[in-house]
Amino acid sequence: MSEKATLTYDGKTTELPVIIGSEKEHAVDIAKLRDQTGLITYDDGFRNTGSCTSDITFIDGEEGILRYRGYPIEELAEKSTFVEVAWLLIYGNLPTRTELRSFSDMFTEYQVLHEDMKYHFEGFPPNAHPMAILSSMINACGCFTRELTGPYDPSKFKRHTARLISQVRTIAAFAYRKSLGLPIVYPKPEYKYTANFLHMMFSMPYGDVDLEPEAVAALDQIFLLHADHEQNCSTSTVRMVASSRANIFASAAAGVCALWGPLHGGANQAVLDMLGQIRNSGDDGSKFLESVKSKEGGKRLMGFGHAVYKNYDPRAKIIKASCDKLLARLKQNDPLLDIALKLEETALKDPYFLERKLYPNVDFYSGIIMRALGIPTEMFTVMFAIGRMPGWIANFKEVMDDPKSRIYRPRQIYTGPTMRTYVPLDQR
Ligand code: CMC
């Protein structure tokens, strides 16, 4: 097969190189197109643009395949842990026992925030959204590591990374406690990553919460399933910010802001809000689906559809199974789960959803699990952010380690007014 594509425009033919990925994806390399032809490409929302090459995550949206560094998500969800997967994503291979030990030890070393950070928490109003607190506090945390303000130093990367992954959960738990006016609970060195997070969320200074192993495992799996998803909105944001050589805390804080929106990470909160509204209206979901199909007020079935998956999101399958298991184990019966199941069953038989290839995504059932764990709806997107941190960091590292990496700078097709002359205020 030819490894060149030919473009003919205005009577002139130009050859463009074709690059081929390890999973046989083909892409026309247009980096020199403007120099050679004066043309730029137009791809609204970048849906057909490979913005980088990457070794981290592979997705086949048509087949519903997701692999981290070559490992199928199903196998990792069954056999691995969030911390192990974080190492895998960032450093490219499964860690040895020694690597995993030292990685975990660094999380313990860095889990406590600088004491002065508490003044920053105090500045937020009581009803501040935890995603706003999270992004601000990640940036604030960066200020307590002076060396971050200098140029990127690969020899310090491992420490900065461990600090960020460790402290994001401390910040998240503190934000939650602050929103309820509860005293802050400090992390415990003897707890593993996810157990420690649940401890900081739910223990009291006078008594530790009882941590059910199944509950800890379910949340750990949620973090793992969210750990990376190639060039989505927040990861592209992180790479964009990193490309200007901003530090890892600043880049991650930008990722949190991008994740917040309801079409991206904010969808998990939106799903629970939607299910709650359906229940409160006395509907079993059928009326709601009719209003979605007639696009009444731009309504969408939240937790359905995906920019890349045109098939069942493989993460949704795992989460659905885990949700059934956890609720049975905790002996909980959630009426919102019944509504979700009914919505899924009806939507998957309905031509509106079938024709548009709209299937449940990762957010459709994750909220039911988090609700069962006692995590409030407003914190759901924060859970996504904790999980996504290793993926953002792995992408940050790829940008920084690439000797050819340049500042990201897309172009645009200007469609505004052509040149006009300034009109003084009294003549307008
Ligand atoms: N409910 C109803 N209709 C939908 C939905 C939905 N959830 N998603 C897409 N459509 C329709 C849309 O109205 C359009 O219809 P038409 O062809 O008649 O104009 C068609 O399907 C294509 O929609 P689109 O907006 O071009 O699709 P997209 O690929 O740009 O959107 C999406 C992807 C995820 C933003 C969208 O499916 C959506 O809004 N879903 C609900 C929000 C959600 O669950 N987001 C979480 C995504 S997974 C987590 C993450 O990675 O962030």
Image: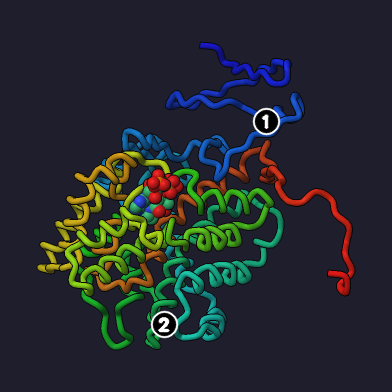
- Residue in the image at 43% along x and 77% along y: 174
Q: SS at mark 2?
A: helix
Number of disc labels: 2
Q: Residue furthest front?
A: 427
Q: Disc 2 residue type?
A: Ser
Mark 2 residue crowding within 10 angstroms, few (<14) / some (14–19) / many (20+): some
Q: Position of residue 404 (x, y in %)?
A: 68, 36
Mark 1 residue crowding within 10 angstroms, few (<14) / some (14–19) / many (20+): few
Q: Are marks 1 and 2 in contact (CB under 8 Å)?
A: no
Quadrant where the image shows the C terminus? bottom right
Answer above or below: position of 234 versus 215. above
Q: Is 131 situated left or right of 240 in this image?
A: left
| Mark toward the viewer: 1 or 2 | 1
Depth check, front residue: 335 or 219: 335
Q: Is 222 situated left or right of 120 in this image?
A: left
- Where does label 2 land, which residue? 179
Q: Disc 1 residue type?
A: Ala
Q: SS at mark 1?
A: loop
- In the rendered structure, which disc, 1 or 2, sits on the residue that comes first in sequence? 1
Distance from the alpha carbon under mark 1 to that under mark 2 = 48 Å
- Residue in the image at 17% along x and 50% along y: 345
Quarter of the image where one finds residue 310: top left
- Where does label 1 land, which residue? 31
Q: Tell me if I can see residue 76 in this picture.
A: no
Q: Position of residue 332 (x, y in %)?
A: 13, 69
Depth check, front residue: 106 or 354: 354
Answer above or below: position of 251 versus 269. above
Q: Position of residue 121 (x, y in %)?
A: 51, 81
Q: Tell me if I can see residue 157 in this picture.
A: yes
Q: Is 96 situated left or right of 404 in this image?
A: left
- Residue in the image at 70% along x and 15% along y: 13
Answer above or below: position of 27 versus 194. above
